[in-house]
Image (cartoon, rainbow, N blue to C red):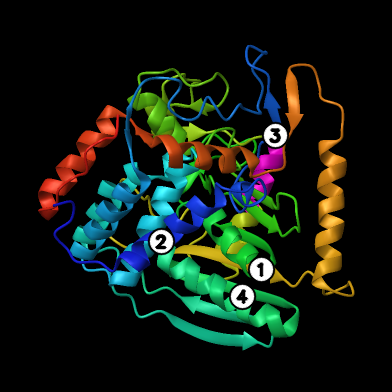
Amino acid sequence: MLAQVSLQSSQLNSSMASSSRAAGTSLEAFRHCPSWCFSRRTAGAPSSRCFAVAAGPTGGRDHSRFRAEDLRVFVASTFRHLGLPVDDAGLVARCLVHADLWAQSGHGVQRVPMYAGRLRAGVVKPRPDIQIKQTAPSSCLVHGDDGMGFVVATRAMDEAIRIAKTQGVGLAGVHRSTHFGCSAHYVRQALEADMISLVFTNSSPAMPPFGGAKALLGASPFAAGAPSGQSHPLVLDMSTTVIARGKLRLMAQRGEPIPPDVGLDEHGRPTRDGMEAFHGVTLPFGGAKGAAISLLMDILSGLLTGAGFGGKVRSLYNDTDAPQDVGHFMMCIRPDLFLPSMDVFKARMDELVSILKSQPCAEGFDEVLVPGEPESRAEVDRLARGIPLQDDVVESLRTEAKLTGLDFPDPVS
């Protein structure tokens, strides 16, 4: 028996069914996923900051593959066992499994034991009393009551969308939240409502301000989206560090060195060890520019909303003494705000994407991609072939299954 907790299959599998339908058409197969990569690199071409989807986070190694639906049921059952309501458990499961489908495994199911540990420690509430306060006609403040960040942020985006539908622009500030996974989940949520969006969050200290030697600012992502008509929408989700911290952990678990010039150990020395950089300092992309953007994330997500800021957000991994107090900032803009209609905006967006894709390719690249396309293509592939999981991730999930009395699914290969 895959799961010993009864869950409504329609709630667990609605996103899966949507993804399966998406795989059948050239347009829908490539919608609503996160990326910062703009070009696909020809196989064998020199390395660059843009990456080929085929490489993925598994580094080309052979790993067991699991059906997305099986993982979704297992993860939802796990969080239901830990006290989350059925709907919320299903939401968290969809977010984590979709991160793996998008080849963003640093935000995927490998984090289940960590989130479960925080629930058991009592620093995350399984049934938060989320409060919404309207602060102006176009804005609201969301008190997350230390609930799962996925649940709190989804509610906040719902509010921003609701406000934008009538006001043109909708803002939602969030405090007393926790880590919310991939920012692209909420960009996608806005896209499904035909909204332009900005999604910001702050996080625990991971990198220094420019010129500093100690971690102070979070590896806070910059995320944005814009809907389109017949082309791939804009879905941008990028860390303000040179490399996402979750990828540092995964590379360390695989025994692979991290690239040079992306992190320092706790003594401020350059390192190629992923765990040393994870517990030390992750460097900002673009030097002063990346650090400045991370500072802006802290101002909008933390300082402005009443959440932790200035290094006061607690560590997701190492601090179970008190809640994190993460802050989020969501903005939705109605695309017809300055144009005659939504259709006009989407037609103009399609034109922009067409222009983008018609540009000549640089040496080593064979295609120009819209942010989000690499992840969309990875999703199609992984829905068909299964999600690859590292052996140590599988073992940690099996251990979690024993703690909750559930059965972990069998691999498909």
Q: Which residues are magenta?
A: 287-295
Q: Is residue 336 above or below residue 379?
A: below
Q: Within 10 angstroms of label 4, few (less than 14), some, or many (20 or more) residues?
A: many
- Sooner in the amino-acid sequence: mark 2 or mark 3: 2
- The answer to whether the residues at label 3 and label 1 have Cβ atoms under 8 Å apart is no
> Which quadrant of the view contains residue 4?
bottom left
Residue 178: x %, y % from top left: 40, 61
User: Magenta segment: does it hold 292?
Assistant: yes
Q: Nearer the viewer, residue 262 or 397?
A: 397
Circle on res. 286: 3
Q: CA distance from mark 4 to mark 2?
A: 19 Å
> Element at badge 3?
loop
Q: Residue at x 62, y 48 (%)?
A: 25
Q: What residue did someone put label 4 on?
A: 160
Report the residue at 37% width, 46% height from top.
Answer: 68
Q: In this rendering, is residue 174 above or below 405?
A: below
Q: Does the residue at mark 4 contact the one at mark 1 (Cβ under 8 Å)?
A: yes
Residue with the mark numbered 2: 178
Residue 293 sits inside the magenta stretch? yes
The amino acid at mark 2 is: Thr
